[in-house]
Image (cartoon, grey):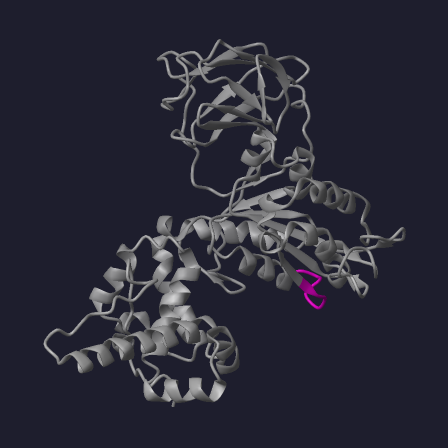
């Protein structure tokens, strides 16, 4: 049966636009999400395959929402794939629409049950040898998986090709984008980052493209958008999956024509910007669900680079933590760390990825500002990482036990905010709603400042 697991090797996905497979070329039907992620089957010309959970299907799935014989696929001579639902219980979705019979093209995404299938031409997957470097910008790694990512990023940095970075929250997508910018010819020009999920829907257009005075209520002054601010440099668009549909249309037009028109204006301005997009969700799956435009995905994802989570590359935890310590002026080689500490670090799943690792370190440094060795750092890894448990001393008089809890709370709370604001007292005071002098006195009381 033609089913093999996709290797962990990073691949450039050069989708271009939806279209028929080149003549004489096969297609691969790849499970990109679902219980059988990584399985694939090959589509030959004029040979049909059946996807389902019945033994004997060319693409056998274990998804309990997939019928025994769910859907038939056949690649015609003209490179178009015929899709026929075989009376499945839960139906077949093509680019967000339920279909009985339909035509699909290379790059299309199908959904059967809880499983997403992608039609890929063989030329769309280009293997890249792992980089010999253990660092790319601020990204540090020892694992093969990340060094394969580095190899792709090193290559694309040399061009102006549009890039889509995919990965969980905290894996370092913005760090990767900044490293690409710094390694390219635009390094001396602006790098502008926009988090689309942090913007109210009615302000996304204004933030990206700018607005003229009086364009809407509250627009008392004209404003340049992110595209104009990034002119000559790089624009990083994070959390792209949250972008409203109307803005997706405008973004596609800007990418194709390289012209920006501010909200409320009739004048278009030419822009020279490299766009790097990022999403923690698979945009291909959002296309399949009908919430993201397929044409915008193929325009943005000329090169798609998935960044693996930290839990599948735990060998990177110690090198990353070492690099973070060096950046904070702590020259403590990992060879000197207690074995119990490294084992605890490697055993943790790191659901928050690199961001969680950085927060754990910053909190420990804030709690022990005078630590001379790694062993003295109070690293809290696991369930207590995000909220420090306060113990109650019932062996003390009530007033003393109460004061001990208050002191523990103050110290933990202050340390957390100082870690988040990188020791900036003014910003910490603003976030906490305290007078800066009072905050400084509290930090001195708890030994968090010299």
User: What's the residue at 60%, 33% (across, down)?
Assistant: 287
* Rendered location of residue 177, percent (x, y): 59, 57
Task: Tell which of 378 and 8 is nearer to you.
Answer: 378
* Rendered location of residue 62, percent (x, y): 36, 23
User: What's the residue at 72%, 55% (across, down)?
Assistant: 208
* Range of residues picked out in magenta: 184-191
Task: Tell which of 135 and 198 is nearer to you.
Answer: 198
User: What's the residue at 83%, 59% (across, down)?
Assistant: 214
- In screen coordinates, is 442 left or right of 120? left
Q: Chief secondary structure of the magenta span?
A: loop
Asked whether residue 320 is in view, the answer is no
Q: Residue reaching furthest left?
A: 395
Residue 95 falls in which quadrant of the image?
top right
* Rendered location of residue 251, percent (x, y): 73, 46
- In screen coordinates, is 446 left or right of 152? left
Q: Residue reaching furthest front?
A: 398
- In screen coordinates, is 374 left or right of 358? left
């Amino acid at each position: 049966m033609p089913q093999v697991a996709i290797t962990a090797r990073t691949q450039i996905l050069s989708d271009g636009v939806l279209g028929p497979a080149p003549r004489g070329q096969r297609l691969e039907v790849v499970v990109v999400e679902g219980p059988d992620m990584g399985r694939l089957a090959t589509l030959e010309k004029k040979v049909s395959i059946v996807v389902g959970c019945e033994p004997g299907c060319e693409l056998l799935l274990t998804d309990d929402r997939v019928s025994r014989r769910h859907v038939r696929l056949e690649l015609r001579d003209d490179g178009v794939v015929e899709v026929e639902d075989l009376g499945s219980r839960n139906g077949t979705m093509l680019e967000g629409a339920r279909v009985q019979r339909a035509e699909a093209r290379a790059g299309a995404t199908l959904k059967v049950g809880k499983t997403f299938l992608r039609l890929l031409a063989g030329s769309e997957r280009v293997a890249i040898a792992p980089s010999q470097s253990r660092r790319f910008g601020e990204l540090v790694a020892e694992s093969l998986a990340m060094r394969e990512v580095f190899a792709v990023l090193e290559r694309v940095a040399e061009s102006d090709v549009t890039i889509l970075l995919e990965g969980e929250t905290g894996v370092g997508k913005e760090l990767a984008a900044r490293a690409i910018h710094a390694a390219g010819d635009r390094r001396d020009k602006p790098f502008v980052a926009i988090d689309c999920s942090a913007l109210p829907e009615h302000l996304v257009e204004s933030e990206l493209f700018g607005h003229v005075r009086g364009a809407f209520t509250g627009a008392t002054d004209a404003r340049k958008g992110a595209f104009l601010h990034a002119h000559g440099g790089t624009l990083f668009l994070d959390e792209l999956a949250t972008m409203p549909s109307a803005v997706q249309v405008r973004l596609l037009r800007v990418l194709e024509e390289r012209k920006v028109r501010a909200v409320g204006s009739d004048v278009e301005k030419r822009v020279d910007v490299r766009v790097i997009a990022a999403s923690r969700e698979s945009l291909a799956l959002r296309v399949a669900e009908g919430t993201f435009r397929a044409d915008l995905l193929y325009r943005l994802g000329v090169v798609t680079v998935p960044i693996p989570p930290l839990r599948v590359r735990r060998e990177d935890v110690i090198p990353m933590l070492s690099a973070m310590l060096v950046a904070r002026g702590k020259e403590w080689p990992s060879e000197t760390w207690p074995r119990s500490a490294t084992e605890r670090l490697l055993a943790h799943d790191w659901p928050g990825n690199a961001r969680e690792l950085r927060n754990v370190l910053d909190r420990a440094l804030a709690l022990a500002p005078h630590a001379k060795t790694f062993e003295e750092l109070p690293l809290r890894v696991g369930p207590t990482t995000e909220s420090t448990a306060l113990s109650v001393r019932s062996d003390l008089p009530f007033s003393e036990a109460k004061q001990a809890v208050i002191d523990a709370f103050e110290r933990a709370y202050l340390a957390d905010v100082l870690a988040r604001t990188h020791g900036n007292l003014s910003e910490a005071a603003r976030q906490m709603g305290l007078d800066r002098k009072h905050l400084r006195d509290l930090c001195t009381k708890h030994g968090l400042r010299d």
